[in-house]
Image (cartoon, grey):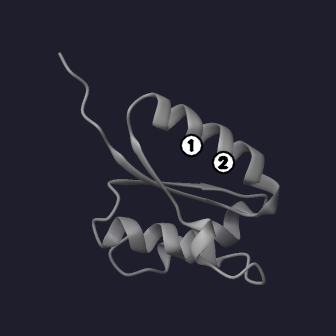
């Protein structure tokens, strides 16, 4: 059975940058499409990347989202603040 390709949005704060790059590389290697939501936000706001990941999933640009952060509660609150997530 052939595995289906999944579109995945991924974002991180500075602390999760290395892990994000490693995970994204493995996902691409496995045949998935990966969108880096971190590059679309300004570096001054730590929760924006979480909201951006949530928006990509909400708009069906991605089927799944991964958020890597040192501030788990803040990122989860930011993502879950998006209606429909």
User: Which residue is identified by label 1?
Assistant: 24
Residue visible at 56% across and 43% down in the picture: 24
**As drawn, which residue projects farthest toward the top?**
1
Labels 2 and 1 touching (C-beta < 8 A): yes
Q: Residue 20, percent across and down? A: 66, 48
* Residue that numbered label 2 is attached to: 20
Q: As drawn, is 73 to the left or to the right of 61?
A: right
Q: Residues within 10 Å of mark 1 (few under 14, many from 20)?
A: many
Give the residue at x 49% y 36%: 27
Vertical side of 15 occupied by 44: above or below: below
Residue 2: give its label.
Answer: none
* Residue 77 visible (yes or no): no
Q: Residue at x 76, y 46 (%)?
A: 18
Q: Give the image quarter of residue 48.
A: bottom right
Quick check: 22 above or below 69? above
Q: CA distance from mark 2 to mark 1?
A: 6 Å
Mark 2, secondary structure of its residue: helix
Where is residue 9 shown, x and y percent of the image? Answer: 46, 57
Which element type, helix, strand or loop, lies under badge 1?
Answer: helix
């Amino acid at each position: 059975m052939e595995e289906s390709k999944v579109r995945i949005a991924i974002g991180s704060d500075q602390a999760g940058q290395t892990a994000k790059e490693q995970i994204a590389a493995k996902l691409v290697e496995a045949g998935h499409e990966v969108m880096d939501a971190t590059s679309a936000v300004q570096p001054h706001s730590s929760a924006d990347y979480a909201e951006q990941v949530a928006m990509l999933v909400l708009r069906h640009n991605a089927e799944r989202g991964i958020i890597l952060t040192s501030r788990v509660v803040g990122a989860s609150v930011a993502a879950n603040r998006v209606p429909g997530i």
